[in-house]
Amino acid sequence: MTTEEKIFNAARIVFQKKGFAGARMQEIADEAGINKAMLHYCFKSKELLFKAIFMNAFGQLAPQINEIFNSKDTVFDKITKFTHSYISFVVLNPYLPQFVIQEMNNNPEFVMAFLKNENRPNPAVLIAQIEKEIADGIIKHINPKQLLLDVFSMTVFPFAAKMMVKGMIQISDAEFNQMMEERKTSIAEQIINSIKK
C-alpha cells in the first residue's frame, strides 16, 4: 500500500468517526502510521486532504452513475439501479454528503468546479429517455427534471441530515443503517408506482 493509500484509508476512518470539523491531522497521521510532517508534506491542510478524498470517491461513483444513465435499461430499471448504487456508495462514505453541503456554503467555487468536470454524472440521456417514455405512454406526464430531483432528494436527504433524521424518528445508528438498506428498494418502488401509467 502506498503512503497516499494509507492516508486516504486513515482519513476516511477519522472523518467518518469525527466528521470534517472534528477531525484532526494528527489523528489521521496516527491512524495511517506516519508522522504528521509526512502527512503535511503530502497534503498541506485538512481541507485539501478532504477534497482529494472527495474527488477520489466521486471518481469511483460518477462512472457507475453515468453507466446507469446511459444504459439501454428502462427508466424504471435506471431508477432502481441508481438508488441501489448511490445508497451503497454513501453507506461506505457517510461523511461526504455533509461535506458537500458545508462546501456549497463555504466554498461554492469548489462545488461548481466539480459540477463542471467532464466526468461528472450527466443525466442528459436519461432526461431524453424519460421524455420518450412519457410520449410512449409508459410514464405519466411529468417534468423529467422534477422526477430526477425527486430521486436525488429521496436518496440524498437522509444522509445529509442524518442527525436530524435520527432525532426526529428516534432511531439508533443500527436502525438508521437498516432503514437505508431498505430504502434502496423502497424509494424506487414509491417513485415508479407514482409515475407508472
Image: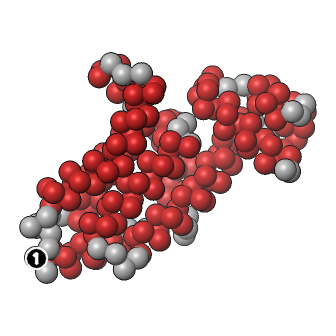
In this picture, residue 59 sits left or right of residue 130: right
Query: Secondary structure beneath disc 1?
Result: loop
The quadrant where residue 30 appears:
top right
In this picture, residue 88 sits left or right of residue 34: left
In the rendering, at what x and y percent does residue 126 appear?
33, 72
- Give the amino acid type for the residue marked by disc 1 in the picture: Gly
80 and 58: which is toward the camera: 80
Kindly identify the residue that appears in the image at 40 percent across and 35 percent down. 178
Mark 1 lies on residue? 137
Whether residue 160 is visible, yes or no, is no
In this picture, residue 184 sits left or right of residue 193: right
Whether residue 175 is visible, yes or no, is yes
The quarter of the image holding the C terminus is bottom left
184 and 44: which is toward the camera: 184
Kindly identify the residue that appears in the image at 13 percent across and 81 percent down. 136
The quadrant where residue 44 appears:
top right
